[in-house]
Image (spheres, rainbow, N blue to C red):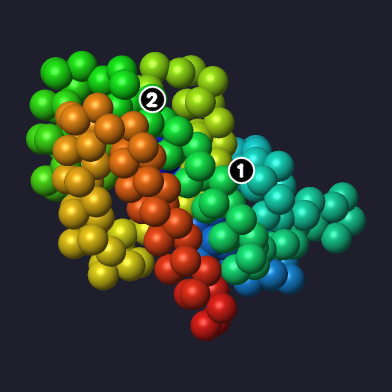
């Protein structure tokens, strides 16, 4: 699964935005839920300012609606939105893998082989591929698109663990062989499989 390019600790604003985004993306905070600013402030042991900033970030993502008088309401995300978003992310990560197959160095392949055997290195593995594509514009697009991926995705779907490791190793082989089309296909399918799992979870409530 593609990475969130953030420090897993981060600032209070980043942590609040990440946690609330995860709850919305996984359906723990369904559409129509009113968010209590004071309760969130207390939960994250902070002042109102970073919480307001986190909620504004979520509003830019289209996940909540911030209104002066009615407060903050969860808009949520539908299974169809999830599939659309993961399709876009899949195209972007597929392109990154295709370019990486043409541009990755032998040292880069060696780093990827080391990262591919451990799911705790999942985010680093994908980030290394994106860097190997050598495209700042593509990296910026992926950073935005990947915000639809819950940061705890693999914990939510442990059945993906073995499948993810297999995909990682197949992707490294394609990159080592310089096979851009195969690398693209593996990367796209990897992301789309994750999107279908998340969409199914939302459909089942």
Give the mark nearest the N terminus, 2 or 1.
Answer: 1
Classify 10 Å Cα crowding around label 2: few (below 14), some (14-19), many (20 and above). Answer: many
How far across and how far down the image is residue 155, in percent?
Answer: 30, 63
Kindly indicate the quadrant of the structure image that contains residue 74: bottom right
From the image, tell me which residue sits under label 2. 99
Residue at image location 56% in from the left, 78% down from the top? 203
How far across and how far down the image is residue 83, in percent?
Answer: 57, 60
Residue at image location 54% in from the left, 51% down from the top? 87
User: Is 116 placed left or right of 84 in the picture?
Assistant: left
Q: Quadrant of the C terminus?
A: bottom right
CA distance separating discs 2 and 1:
34 Å
Classify 10 Å Cα crowding around label 1: few (below 14), some (14-19), many (20 and above). Answer: many
Verify CB contact (< 8 Å) between mark 2 and mark 1.
no
Q: Nearer the viewer, residue 29 or 125?
A: 125
Local SS, label 2: helix
Q: Nearer the viewer, residue 48 or 176?
A: 176
Residue at image location 42% in from the left, 48% down from the top? 188
How far across and how far down the image is residue 124, in percent?
Answer: 27, 35
How far across and how far down the image is residue 16, in percent?
Answer: 52, 48
**Image: 171 above or below 99:** below
Question: Which mark is drawn over residue 54?
Answer: 1
């Amino acid at each position: 699964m593609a990475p969130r390019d953030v420090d897993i600790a981060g600032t209070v604003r980043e942590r609040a935005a990440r946690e609330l985004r995860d709850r919305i993306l996984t359906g723990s905070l369904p559409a129509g839920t009113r968010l209590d600013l004071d309760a969130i402030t207390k939960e994250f042991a902070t002042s109102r300012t970073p919480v307001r900033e986190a909620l504004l970030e979520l509003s830019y993502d289209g996940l909540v609606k911030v209104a002066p008088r009615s407060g903050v309401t969860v808009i949520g995300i539908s299974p169809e939105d999830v599939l659309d978003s993961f399709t876009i992310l899949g195209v972007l990560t597929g392109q990154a893998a295709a370019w990486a197959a043409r541009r990755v160095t032998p040292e880069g392949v060696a780093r990827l082989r080391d990262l591919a055997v451990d799911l705790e290195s999942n985010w680093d593995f994908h980030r290394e591929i994106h860097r190997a594509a050598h495209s700042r514009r593509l990296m910026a697009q992926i950073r935005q698109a990947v915000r639809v991926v819950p940061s705890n995705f693999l914990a939510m779907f442990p059945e993906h663990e073995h499948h993810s490791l297999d995909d990682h190793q197949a992707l490294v082989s394609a990159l080592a062989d310089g096979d851009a089309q195969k690398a693209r296909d593996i990367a796209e399918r990897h992301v789309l499989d994750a999107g279908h799992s998340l969409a199914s979870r939302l459909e089942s409530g």
